[in-house]
Amino acid sequence: MRRLDLEHIIRAAGSIAGADRLVVIGSQAILGSFPDPPAELAVSAEADIYPLDAPEKADLIDGSIGEKSPFHETFGYYAHGVNPEAAVLPVNWQSRWVPLQNENTRGVIGLCLSPVDLAVSKLAAGREKDLSFVTAMLHHGWITVDAVQNVLSEVAEMQSPQIRLRLEWCRKRCRSDPSSNVS
């Protein structure tokens, strides 16, 4: 997905839900911070999204421009309407939102996860694709191990140890790559 595609999804989802602020929590939230990411960080065709003030309308978005919809078939990307609990996030994640609003969103604001909060979410999920995503973010210098560790105090105590272990695994994996920015 490209940033222009995410802007299109934000615009369409805002129109469908009658919302002027949408939260983008999936991997494509990275497009809020980095408009032109390398291919390994832009492989997803979906944007996980919900209206900030009416999260219950996520189903409406999903049904209208979700997977296998005419929107998806036409453009090759889609919105995945999710609920606010779909991701494990640090307590203060909303203070770090990266707003995405321009003429392409027609006034609708996409509130994208910050890179560090996105990394925590991916580390909590712990799937191979999530760990590869975090490793790539480390590799490109878009997050640091220290930055992620600094927000771990905001994560539930029972989840923090697992997230730390996965972060260390990503750091080691990244360090084994000689072209990596991680020391």
Image: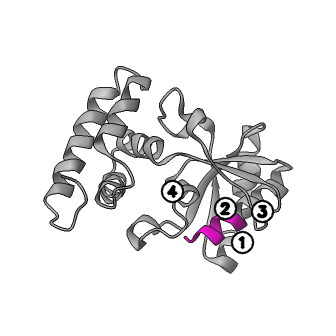
**N-term mark: 1 or 3:** 3
Does the segment drawn in magenta span residue 2? yes
Q: Is residue 75 left or right of residue 29?
A: right
Amino acid, disc 3: Ala
Percent across and percent down for residue 170 are 24, 49
Dot 4 lies on which element?
helix
Q: Main secondary structure of the magenta part?
A: helix
Relative to 110, residue 123 above or below: above
Which residue is the site of mark 1? Answer: 71
Amino acid, disc 1: Phe
Q: What's drawn in magenta, residue-wise?
A: 1-8
Marker disc for residue 66: 2
**N-term mark: 1 or 2:** 2
Mark 3: few/some/many CA within 10 Å (<14, 14-19, 20+): many
The answer for how far apart the CA atoms under marks 1 and 3 are is: 10 Å
Marker disc for residue 30: 4
Dot 1 lies on which element?
helix
User: From this viewpoint, which residue is outermost toward the bottom?
Assistant: 74
Dots 1, 2 in contact, CB < 8 A: yes
Relative to 8, residue 169 above or below: above
